[in-house]
Image (cartoon, rainbow, N blue to C red):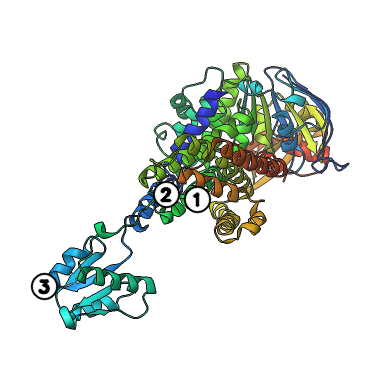
């Protein structure tokens, strides 16, 4: 669905590249996470893929279209949810969706249905300018689904949303992906990436450091540990044991048998920890 | 493309009706026309105002009513107060030998002279029919002041139409929606055309309404007016786009429009006050040519060749300016 080969981009058109020699492929139906801190080159790459930035060097095809010369009809197959909500504040939520729907050459979804999906049912007649930040964000997200996109660009889709709504959004992404929609997810939230993505790419300073599935990364870079909280002679103790080390395994079995266990958690490495380990940088 | 262009136009129109400032700009040509109608003197308006005391000079009043605007007051004190007000009004006091004309003293000489002549004609019972003067005219029935205001109104309407475009673009920038349009299947050209329709229509409808309300329809060739307003509105549209992409909020856009008023006012002043040998000083300004062309249209003496010539000059200057500003507009619409 997306092919990127040796992509370079410089805002000043000099050797100071925001993105350098980036290559990756995303097959149809995959949820691909593009992860990195602010200024890493995520938005630049996404901007080039969506035609918001001009392709300077490299080869990029999106949904079968060469982005060297963007064809507007390409956007009939693409949905784009922006990190910063961008809806017309003087128009109602429904008017916003109806207006954008008229710009597509393909059948579009019912605005009321979309508003209901994102939890904005009954808010269709309210001007977007009166919406909270989270509501505007959900409206932007809903708009990105108008044309039943085959390829869906999601830029920080859960930023600024409360956990319940964020969970709804994640559910929608999973549901769309099950229907065959390819998702290009740009985020610095590793938990969402871990939950949604089939594969992730770590990008720092315009360079992709690695691309793999979260599961493989955890196996490769994580340590299998268990954290146990137990009562010992009236005192609460916490200890961490490796599930691979024989000595630790024996000690853990002994504690389970003799002590009063309060809590017990596996301590597999998070994607964030792996990111820091691989790139040496934190996600800020 | 046409359908999507229309969609953009309909959205702008819809939103403009919800925005006080935009709505104000749409209706201002009509307000302006009514204001000009109310305040600009007509050609039939008298040049002299006279005030009399009620019950005095009844025969003189009956005679003078055909030549002057007559006001009657109840007594001498009231007449004195009326004469002392700031406007130019001449008081007629007493009858026969004791009669005299009362003025403030600062009235234009021709006003006092005209009042004196009227008094003389009245005393000698001279009628208009007694005159042997033969008058020939060119048939112009509209007051020059009204044409001047109408012309400035047309210029202002075109400029405000451009400002309406800039406000719509500023709205898009403030809402950050240009990026959303950039990832929608609509071409930049269709979007720009859609945004421009509003400005062109406001200019065409506003200027036509103004001409109709001002009662100039009899002298104006409407086809010429519409063509020339369309041509001149292209300049305003370009200014509107430039102001829009360079302004981050409404106040900045308004401030930019004020700056454009400067060459506009200079062009009007240049045409009206510069002597013929210095008119070339203003040739650089498209507003000068627009004002000059509009004046001929409003007077009903614009030939088609002149229309073509003036349009070509305006379009030529617009093309030069466009070549300079197009990259900035394009860049401003990229995100």
Judging from the image, what secondary structure is the residue with disc 2 in? Answer: helix
Rendered view: B109 above or below B272: below
Q: Residues within 10 Å of mark 2 (few under 14, many from 20)?
A: some
Screen quadrant of the C terminus of chain B:
top right
Q: Chain of mark 3?
A: B
Horizontal arrangement in the rendering, residue A155 relative to residue B122 (left or right): right
What count of labels does the image hold? 3
Screen quadrant of the N terminus of chain B:
top right
**Residue under the point 66% across and 35% down:** A191
Q: Earlier in the sequence, mark 2 or mark 3?
A: 2
- Callouts 2 and 3 in the same chain: yes
**Residue under the point 59% across and 26% down:** A173
Measuring from the top left, give residue A235's x and y in whole percent.
Answer: 64, 49
**Residue under the point 65% across and 58% down:** B277
Front tag of 1 and 3: 3
Measuring from the top left, give residue A56's x and y in whole percent.
Answer: 81, 32
Q: Which residue is mark 3?
A: B55
Q: Which residue is mark 2?
A: B28
Identity of the residue furthest to the left in this view = B55
Marking on residue B72: none
Q: Chain of mark 2?
A: B
Judging from the image, what secondary structure is the residue with disc 3 in? Answer: loop
Q: Quadrant of residue B131?
A: bottom left
């Amino acid at each position: 669905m997306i092919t990127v080969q040796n992509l370079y981009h410089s805002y000043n058109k000099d050797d100071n590249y925001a993105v350098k020699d980036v290559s990756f492929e995303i097959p149809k139906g995959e949820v691909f996470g593009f992860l990195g801190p602010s200024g890493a080159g995520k938005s630049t790459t996404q901007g080039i893929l969506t035609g918001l930035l001009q392709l300077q060097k490299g080869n990029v095809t999106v949904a079968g279209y060469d982005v060297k010369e963007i064809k507007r009809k390409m956007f009939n197959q693409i949905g784009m949810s922006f990190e910063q909500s961008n809806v017309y504040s003087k128009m109602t939520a429904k008017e916003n969706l109806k207006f954008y729907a008229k710009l597509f050459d393909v059948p579009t979804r019912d605005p009321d249905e979309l508003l209901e999906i994102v939890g904005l049912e009954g808010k269709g007649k309210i001007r977007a300018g009166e919406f909270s930040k989270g509501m505007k964000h959900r409206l932007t997200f809903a708009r990105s689904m108008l044309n039943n996109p085959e390829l869906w660009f999601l830029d920080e889709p859960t930023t600024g949303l409360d956990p319940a709504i964020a969970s709804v959004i994640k559910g929608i992404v999973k549901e769309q992906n099950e229907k065959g929609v390819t998702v290009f997810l740009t985020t610095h939230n590793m938990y969402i990436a871990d939950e949604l993505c089939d594969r992730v790419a770590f990008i720092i300073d315009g360079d992709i450091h690695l691309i793999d599935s979260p599961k493989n990364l955890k196996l490769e870079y994580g340590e299998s540990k268990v954290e146990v909280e137990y009562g010992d002679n009236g005192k609460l103790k916490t200890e961490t044991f490796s599930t691979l080390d024989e000595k630790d395994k024996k000690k853990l079995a002994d504690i389970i048998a003799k002590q009063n266990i309060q809590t017990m958690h596996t301590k597999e490495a998070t994607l964030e920890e792996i990111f820091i380990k691989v790139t040496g940088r934190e996600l800020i | 493309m046409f359908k999507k262009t229309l969609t953009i136009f309909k959205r702008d129109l819809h939103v403009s009706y919800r925005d006080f400032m935009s709505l104000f700009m749409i209706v201002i040509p009509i307000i302006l026309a009514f204001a000009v109608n109310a305040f600009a003197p007509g050609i039939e308006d008298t040049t002299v105002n006279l005030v009399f005391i009620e019950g005095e000079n009844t025969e003189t009043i009956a005679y003078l009513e055909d030549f002057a605007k007559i006001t009657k007051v109840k007594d001498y004190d009231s007449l004195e107060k009326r004469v002392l007000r700031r406007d130019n009004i001449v008081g007629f006091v007493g009858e026969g030998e004791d009669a005299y004309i009362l003025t403030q003293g600062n009235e234009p000489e021709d006003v006092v002279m005209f009042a004196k002549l009227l008094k003389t004609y009245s005393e000698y019972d001279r009628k208009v029919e007694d005159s042997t003067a033969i008058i020939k005219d060119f048939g112009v029935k509209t007051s020059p002041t009204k044409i001047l205001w109408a012309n400035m109104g047309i210029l202002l309407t075109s400029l405000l139409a451009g400002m309406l475009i800039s406000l719509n673009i500023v709205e898009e920038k403030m809402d950050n929606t240009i990026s959303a349009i950039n990832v929608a299947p609509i071409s930049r050209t269709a979007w720009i055309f859609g945004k421009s329709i509003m400005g062109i229509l406001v200019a065409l409808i506003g200027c036509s309404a103004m001409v109709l309300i001002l009662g100039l329809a009899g002298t104006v060739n409407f086809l010429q007016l519409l063509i020339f307003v369309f041509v001149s509105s292209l300049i305003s549209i370009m200014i509107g786009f430039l102001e829009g992409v360079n302004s981050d909020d409404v106040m900045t856009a308004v401030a930019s429009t004020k700056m454009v008023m400067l060459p506009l006012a200079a062009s009007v002043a240049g045409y009206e006050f510069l002597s013929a040998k210095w008119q070339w000083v203003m040739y650089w300004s498209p507003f000068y040519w627009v004002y000059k062309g509009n004046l001929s249209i409003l007077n009903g003496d614009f030939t088609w060749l002149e229309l073509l010539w003036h349009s070509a000059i305006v379009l030529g200057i617009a093309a030069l300016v466009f070549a300079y500003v197009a990259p900035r507009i394009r860049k401003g619409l990229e995100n």
